[in-house]
DNA sequence: AGTCAAACCTGTTTGC
DNA sequence: TGCAAACAGGTTTGAC
């Protein structure tokens, strides 16, 4: 569910308050959300207990807490995951999976971190950090980074996201045009550029009037630059509204929904008028999910790929 | 090496 | 009304 803006809302909500706090205890209530922690739930708990949280970092849709142990608590929300800061005594949420008890922190007032996840596509793990030039071995340019980012091992292959000031646009354009696939498929590939999911890919494509099945190798550099700008604009706007919530499955750390849904131009609006030209929005089956377009603003290319 | 479909889950909505 | 199928914001795995 959550794409970059939703995860960033969580990072901001978490960041100010948990940095400096220590993890006093951990309760794993369901094994699935820690399945990526291969050493098991007991090891997961042991590695967290007694560590201090030094930072809250995000790349694309991945979020992690850096720990003074040198490792990181890595989180991915999947389709329905939530990270909440709730008072220790409040009753367990129906899909509460992991509880992380804290000492200290700023204004925490006895709150604990709760990982709540209905569908359990998301998860938590404690992992090591690795230095990479750009998070991509031999990938997105070898432009030297003044400070090579330390990334959790499972994030090392994820590209910089569209809001990252160090995103190498020229290298991204080269890689994108070298692909033999459709544009939206490429936008959703997190190893190319990260942060975009089904909602914001459709919204950005609509803004620049490009069809999702446009072959990536037919795009001009200016068109790609415009598309990238559109992704930033739509994500920036979503961030300002607290993200997109279709239901109670996406919420901030305080359990509150975002309000960007009402600003969506095409996503989830099949049959409703295009805000630009009034033509009914169309929904197509795409990669086991959906793609929404305005058939007039975004005509299907003659040579379509996906 | 690059591309793509299936699998991983539970809950709600849609259609017969 | 009741039931089954379709669908939901994502990533990984493995087949080709």
Image: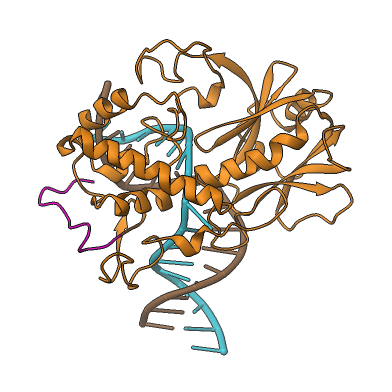
Chain colours: A orange, B brown, C cyan
Tell whether position A298 is magenta: yes
Q: Quadrant of residue C16?
A: top left
Image point (84%, 44%), residue name:
A111
Q: Main secondary structure of the magenta part?
A: loop
Res. A77 visible in picture: no
Residue A165 position, x and y percent, is: 46, 27
Considering only vertical position in the picture, is B13 above or below A76? below
Image point (80%, 23%), residue name:
A51
Res. A205 visible in picture: yes
Considering only vertical position in the picture, is A200 above or below A19? below
Q: Residue furthest left?
A: A302
Residue A74 position, x and y percent, is: 63, 31
Q: Is residue A253 found left or right of A290 in the rendered image?
A: right
Q: Which residues are magenta?
A: A293-306
Residue A283 position, x and y percent, is: 31, 64
Image point (35%, 19%), residue name:
A139
Residue A131 position, x and y percent, is: 53, 13
Number of marks drawn = 0
Q: Is residue A164 found left or right of A251 in the rendered image?
A: left
Considering only vertical position in the picture, is A6 above or below A132? below
Q: Quadrant of residue A217?
A: top left
Q: Is residue A195 found left or right of A26 in the rendered image?
A: left
Tell whether position A226 is magenta: no
Image point (21%, 33%), residue name:
A221
């Amino acid at each position: 569910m959550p794409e970059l803006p939703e995860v960033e809302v969580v990072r901001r909500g978490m960041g100010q308050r948990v940095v400096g706090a220590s993890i006093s205890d951990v309760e794993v209530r369901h094994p699935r959300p820690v399945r990526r922690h291969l050493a098991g739930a007991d090891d997961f708990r042991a590695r967290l207990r007694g560590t201090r949280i030094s930072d809250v970092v995000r790349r694309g849709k991945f979020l992690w807490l850096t720990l003074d142990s040198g490792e990181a608590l890595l989180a991915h929300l999947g389709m329905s995951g939530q990270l909440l800061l709730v008072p220790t005594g409040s009753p367990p949420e129906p899909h509460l999976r992991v509880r992380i008890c804290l000492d200290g922190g700023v204004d925490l007032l006895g709150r604990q971190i709760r990982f709540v996840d209905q569908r359990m596509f998301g998860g938590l793990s404690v992992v090591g950090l690795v230095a990479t030039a750009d998070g991509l071995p031999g990938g997105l340019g070898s432009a030297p980074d003044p400070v090579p980012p330390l990334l959790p091992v499972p994030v090392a292959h994820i590209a910089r996201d569209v809001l990252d000031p160090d995103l190498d646009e020229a290298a991204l354009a080269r890689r994108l045009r070298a692909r033999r696939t459709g544009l939206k498929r490429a936008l959703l590939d997190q190893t190319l550029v990260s942060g975009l999911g089904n909602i914001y890919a459709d919204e950005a494509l609509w803004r620049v009037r490009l069809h999702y099945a446009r072959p990536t190798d037919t795009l001009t550099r200016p068109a790609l630059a415009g598309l990238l700008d559109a992704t930033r604009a739509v994500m920036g706007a979503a961030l300002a509204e607290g993200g997109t919530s279709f239901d109670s499955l996406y919420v901030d750390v305080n359990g509150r929904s975002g309000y960007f849904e009402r600003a969506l131009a095409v996503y989830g609006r099949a049959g409703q008028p295009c805000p630009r030209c009034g033509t009914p929005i169309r929904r197509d089956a795409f990669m086991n999910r959906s793609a929404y377009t305005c058939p007039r603003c975004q005509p299907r290319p003659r040579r379509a790929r996906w």
